[in-house]
Image (cartoon, rainbow, N blue to C red):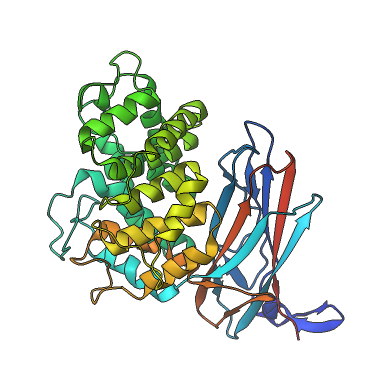
Amino acid sequence: MKKLLKKKVNVFGKSVPVFAIVILGLALVSAALISFWGTITGSVIVTQGLFLDGKNYEAQITETWNPFTSLESKTFVSAHSLENDASVDAEVQLDYKCVDSNCEGIITGYYNPSMEKIITGADRLVATQNDDGGWDWTNPDLVLTSPSPENTFGVTAQGLLTAYELTGNQDYLDAAKLAGNHLVTLFGTNIIDNRINAFDIVFLYNLGEISGVDTYTNKADDLIGTLTEDNYWAHNYGSFCSATTGCTAQNMFDAIKNRRGAANIGIILWDLAPWVKAANLGEEYSWANDLKNIMDVAYDSLTNDGELYNIGLSGVVSATGNPSAVTALINKQASTGEWTSGNGAEQDTAYAVMALMSVGKMTEAVKGAIWLASTQGSEDGWSTPENTEVTSEVLQTMLLTEELTNPFKIAVPAGESVGFAIVNHFPKMLVPDTYIIETKVMPVTA
């Protein structure tokens, strides 16, 4: 290996040591925008020296994203890590290219995340994780034997997946797996007695994809499958769902409305948003579209004077992309970057940032993320009192605290790792086609 690293090769007419050729990567994103279906795929090829996404790949890695149609806009955010195991500093450049198609209207951006906030926040979640794989909801301590609230496993562990993708730190993935293992056991053979939480389903799908462990994906599929059969919601909160045929989208809306109270439309819309995402991940597209239509109608009754107004707006924006809700959410942002209501500024702002990311409103999203980065507590969590769920929600926004400008260069110090995010936004009404956005990660040469 030492001889290989000392060997010199010709690059662009210059003799360059192999270890200086730190990375030649290809991040390939393709969206097949054919009515009613399409896929996003990505490929990465990496050579010896610098590690991309935690591994020294010799072959391509392919990831598939949710299908979407040309009748809707979509934003895809992917997190990546660069680790420099060489003894010299490295610098890479991200080169953008639209391949084969006219990419007019498609916006691609590159972002530096707040690595310090992500690492310290994720470390706090690992340190306060209970033995059962969950967390105390507020005021977490280092006494880890307490039983955790069952409804916060997935939503809290999701932040660890963001941290893992950016750092490659196995501790974060192991902690996320511990939460996932609890959910697999909880929803074992008897799913009627345990409330199915859409955040848990989304988390299990994401955990299965990132870890490569089919157990998590299969369990998420099982839980989505209960929408068409007997389940918890058929026996609780008004029993709107059927013990024979499961839940229609309208049934789910009615059940959550019963649970939250008809007057609390903001939190009802927030509760419904992850069900749209979970149904799409489970390829229940018709069910998801029905729920989106129901949410758009319910949005008309969301009033500006409610304490859960902002969280409701974020739910509608992230699930349906409703233009009126997008405008209303942007108009509620304070000049300093945050969103404030009775629900708590950190949580309101985290969901607003994620919602605006999903519709490509990156200027406002970055401003909100910067504000969140400034509010980290003395114990490295977020919210007052400290709230583990909110800490996770904030971590998911820390991808976007700085937008890179062209030329997109990233410094990777010797022996260290850094992260970056790629954001691709596809507007509505693109001509159905295959759009390939190519990002090459290349060494910067003198």
Q: Give the image location of residue 266, x and y in percent.
A: 31, 45
Q: Residue furthest top?
A: 244
Based on the displayed image, in which of its 4 quarters is residue 130 positioned? bottom left
Q: Give the image location of residue 34, x and y in percent.
A: 69, 35
Q: Residue furthest right?
A: 13
Total count of labels:
0
Q: Nearer the viewer, residue 425 or 341?
A: 341
Residue at point 28%, 50% (across, down): 308
Residue at point 16%, 66% (across, down): 142
Side of 440 relative to 311 (left or right): right
Side of 41 relative to 272 (left or right): right
Q: Nearer the viewer, residue 400 or 147?
A: 400
Q: Is residue 188 visible?
A: no
Residue at point 36%, 61% (across, down): 349
Q: Give the image location of residue 223, x and y in percent.
A: 36, 31
- The C terminus, quarter of image: bottom right
Based on the displayed image, in which of its 4 quarters is residue 329 positioned? bottom left
- The N terminus, quarter of image: bottom right
Based on the displayed image, in which of its 4 quarters is residue 388 positioned? bottom left
Q: Give the image location of residue 165, x and y in percent.
A: 48, 60
Residue at point 37%, 35% (across, down): 298
From what the image shows, is residue 243 above or below residue 113?
above
Side of 387 relative to 277 (left or right): left
Q: Is residue 298 visible?
A: yes
